[in-house]
Image: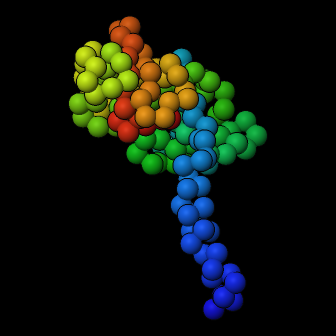
Amino acid sequence: MLPPRLLAGAPLLALTVLAAPHAVAFDFKTVGTAPAILYETPSARGNKLYTAPPGMPLQVMIAYGDWVKVRDMNGDVAWTQARSLAARRNVLVNKPGGRVHAGPADTSAVLMTADKGVVLELVDPNALVWARVRHRDGIVGYIKVSDIWGL
């Protein structure tokens, strides 16, 4: 049992802990021009899990020498060589029918609708509610942050 003086601060501590995940910025990278092989361990001798296509965003969890531990949109964790990743930022549409609007509002004209898994280039990495994105066909617009993964 905690002393009364510590219990009094428990609500504030709980709020701080709950707010913390939102304050953490994740490091995302994009698979470069060549596919990246993802391994079970940080070694080319490890079991190959799958190959990530060029342009796929990955969340970098930790670095270990020339290797990085990454997480994909499905939550799968693997290792890949750091040189396989580029600093350019892409995101994936995480739900069917993600709408890219002309402006950062639901009332803006819909420029395109993207299926789940469509890759979009992130134009502005400081997005909060709406992210400015570019499709490979040249369409530039805004999509809700809740409709994408990789930010």
Query: Which of 8 and 57 lies nearest the eye of the viewer?
Result: 8
Front residue of 123 and 4: 4
Which residue: 50% across, 19% down? 123
- Is residue 51 in view? no
**What residue is shown at x 57% (from left), y 21% (from top)?**
88
Q: Is residue 133 left or right of residue 30?
A: left
The residue nearer to you, when weighing 39 against 137, is 137
> Relative to 3, is 109 above or below?
above
Residue 17 locus on image (x, y percent) = 59, 62
Q: Is residue 13 above or below residue 38?
A: below
At horizontal 63% and vertical 82% (from top left) the residue drawn is 7
Where is residue 16? Give x, y as percent: 60, 61
Location of residue 138 in the rendering, given as x and y in whole percent from the top left corner = 38, 7
Outermost residue toward the top?
138
Where residue 101 appears, as percent x and y from the top left, is 31, 20
Residue situated in front as seen by the camera: 101 or 62:
101
